[in-house]
Every structure is written in C-alpha cells, then in structure tokens.
Image (cartoon, coloured by chain):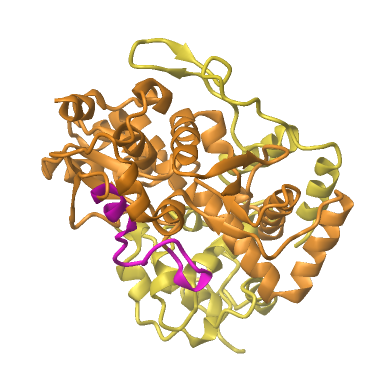
Amino acid sequence: MSLVDLMTMAKPNLESREKILAKLRGRELVNCFQCIKCTSGCTALKLLELKPHEIIKLVNLGFVDELPSSDIIWTCVTCLKCVQRCPQKASPYHVIMALRNLAVEREAKVPEGYLKAVSQILETGLAETAQKVVTGEMETVDRVCLKLPKIISPKEGFQAVFMKTMEEK
Amino acid sequence: MKTAVFWGCRILTGQFAYEMSVREVLPKLGIKLVDLRESVCCGDPIKSVNDFTANYLGARILALANLTGLDNLLVPCNRCHFTISEAKNVISTSAKTGQKIKDLLKEEDLEYNPNIKIWHTIDLLHDLVGLARIKKAVAKPLKGLKVATHIGCQIIRYSDLGRVDDAENPRKLDELIEALGAETIDYAEKLDCCGSALMYSHPDSAFSLAGSKLKAVQNLAVDGLVVSCPDCQLMFDVKQKDAGTTVGAKLNVPVVYYTQLLGLALGIDERKLGLRLNQSPVDQIMTKILV
C-alpha cells in the first residue's frame, strides 16, 4: 500500500492492523461503509468527542500506531450501542478494546485504575477492596455486622494460571 | 428451584443492599441460592488490559458454577453478566481460544460447562418466576408509587449475544414494577448510560453522565429511580452529590434496587432489604408506601 498521511507523513502499519483484526475474531471491519450510526449514537461523543467511525476508518487504512497512545481510546463508556446498531457488524467497541490491549502491550499511557485492578485480582481475587458503608443513621457497617457470608479467596493455583493468561497476546 | 449465584466484586465489596435484598426476596419466590466456592473477579476491568485473560476469568465463573452441579447461574451485576456471556460466546465461536481456555482451567482442576444458563435478576424474576407468581405474592401493593426505570446498558446489548431484554425498548423492568402495583414512566433519557465505566479514566465525565440523567429524572416529578445493576446504583445513589455538583444541580432523587422495592411489596422488613444503606433520600419512597 502506498498510502501516506500528508499531514503527518505517517505510513500505514499493516502488522499492527493484523493484530487488531486477529483480536476481532472475524468481525467484518472492512465492511464498514461509514454510515456513522455508531458515532451518532455514541455516549462519549457529546462529552469527550469520541468518534468511533473515525477509529474504524483509521484501523482499516492501517493508521494504527498513534491510536494506542491516544487518550481517545479510554473515553469509551462501554454502553455497547455501537455494537448493537452497526449494520455491518464492524463493532467499534471491540476495535477500541483491541486498541486498549495494544496500548497495554506497548506500555503506552494506561489509566492507573486498570493496572491496579490487575494487581488487586492477583492479590485477592477481586478487582475491588472491601468497603465499610455509612448508613443514613451514621452507623458504619461491613459484611460482618450485616451477617453476610465471608468473602472466600480463590484457591492457590489461581495466581499462576492468571499470570499465564496475561502472557497471551 | 435451586440456582448457583455469582455476585461479583462491586456487590460483595460495597453494594451490600443488592445482595441482602436478593438473598431475601428470591427464597420467598421459590428460588434457592447456592453460592460459588470462591469469590473472584468476572474479568470485566481486564477486558481493557488483556482480552484473553478477561475471557478466561469469565469462563472460570462458569467452571466454578459447574462444581455446584446446577444448570442455572444467577449473575445480578450487569457488567459481570455481559463479561461471562461474552466469554461463553468466544468459547463457542472460536475453537482455538476455547481450547486454550479449557486447557488452562484443567490446570486449576476446573471444567468448563457450556450448558449452564446465565440469568440476571431481571429475567430470572420476569421469565422464570413469572409476573403472575410475583403478583400473587405481593402482600403490600405499592399503589400510588410512580417511578422511572434504568435497566442499564450491558444486560440489553448486544442482542447477538442473547441478552436479557430488547436493546432499544426494554420493558421487563417496567412490567416487574407494574406487577407490584406501582406505575412506571417512559422518558427520553431512559436508555442513557450511568457513566460508571469512565470512573477509572475520566471521573468528571462519569459524574456528568450520571448527573444529566438524574437531572432529567428529577424533572419528571416521579417518586424515584429503580435500577438493577450495582455500578448504576453506585453512580446514581452513592455518587449522587458529586454528580449534582458536576452538572450544577441540587439533586434529590431516591434510587433503589428493584429487589428492594419487590421486598417491600412482599412485606419484608426494610432493614433486611438494606434500605438504610442507600445514600439517596429513600425515606421519601418509604413514606409514600407506608401512607
């Protein structure tokens, strides 16, 4: 492909494009005909100017390298409206998730919360830490005083297998 | 009937009222709950980090459910419901990934079972228990109560996956509320998202989404907002003040779980339903019901 972005002189990276396509497991990205149904219904468009149809176009053309380091891929609210409404089964949501995975792989800027979730799961099995809740009567309560069953951590083999899955690209 | 139940992180670590009310109401309607061996993440936040790991964790929940010997799994959280459903879909449509996941599960002495049906609180009550049975069990009809509903995003989309209700016109939650004698209202913002997924990356935008929806609900002059997802409840109930500050509105919207409302209609004591754990002004609903 002899395509060049004349604004930035960026060239398509077909290898990265293939990586994204592999993650989509047969979703027909190339069938996107830019009807913009995804962007017109996008929850994050109004607030954060996410334009899913542009992301699809960029990935289709192979301009993938800037996207993983861009903040825009972290603005998706995962409401799944674009997956539902896409007439071509191109699914911008899944493309954005694949780009996020690529960002992690390339050690680009990833919101801390996600990485914290990983270490939290490794440590306790859960992505969140147990909290105490203050009631309307200003009483502080937790699971024990509410007589809810104890949280049981995963068995020993879990961590090793979890780490193994993280090596899959 | 017995069903396995997987609660997920958000409910177990902070949204206790949902767990309490589900544990109270379901046995009264003939559903016995069996907890899984352990409490682990469904994989939802990991979808953004590593898709394979997320699917492994989702499949692992079904493998844990398999240990109970039951064919049904209740997943009361919308996000967990989506993540586990998508993992199931990946295993059935992608033989290579599916096999890798099954092999790794074996290393943990777990076995994947494709025949386990995944339920959410909404379709379990609507389709399995049924509106007729719920209507019959109501001891205290919620006459005169008018509420708005928020079904959430991830249990209604995307339909190819097989979801709990229609993607563009979900009615089940409304019908479940009507079965209790209360009224629901249709409104333009009904399908708007609560914004919780942005809490990791753009909290201000998350509050802005929650605040805009709450503002719209407040303008409807209804008695409250009914939800069925711990993430939505977190945004609309716990974070209501932050949401109000962000959109510049004084918000005063009572937000309850459907199972709390159902519990009240069944005549269960409000303390057992965790109503005092809600941070929004739910006493407004209580007063209305008790009159």
Examine the rendering and report whether any part of residue B278 can be seen: yes
| Left or right placement of residue B32 versus residue B51 in this view | left
Up the image or down, B11 lies above or below A169; here it is above
Residue A77 vertical placement versus B19 (above, below) = below
Residue at 36% x, 57% y: name it: A44
Task: Find residue A15 and report its image quarter.
Answer: bottom right
Residue at the bottom extreme of this rendering: A1
Residue A29 position in % (x across, y down):
53, 81
Residue B266 image point, x, y percent: 33, 35
Give coordinates of residue A3: x percent, y percent: 56, 85
The residue positioned 70% from the left and 74% from the top of the image is B94
Region rendered in magenta: B157-178
Q: Which chain is orange?
A: B
- Is B166 included in the stretch rendered in magenta? yes
Which chain did the image draw in yellow? A
| Res A49 quadrant in image | bottom left
In the rendered structure, the answer to whether residue A141 lies left or right of residue B290 reads right
In which quadrant of the rendered image does the C terminus of chain A lie?
bottom right
Q: Is residue B32 magenta?
A: no
Whether residue A106 is visible here, answered yes or no, is no
Q: Quadrant of residue A147?
A: top right
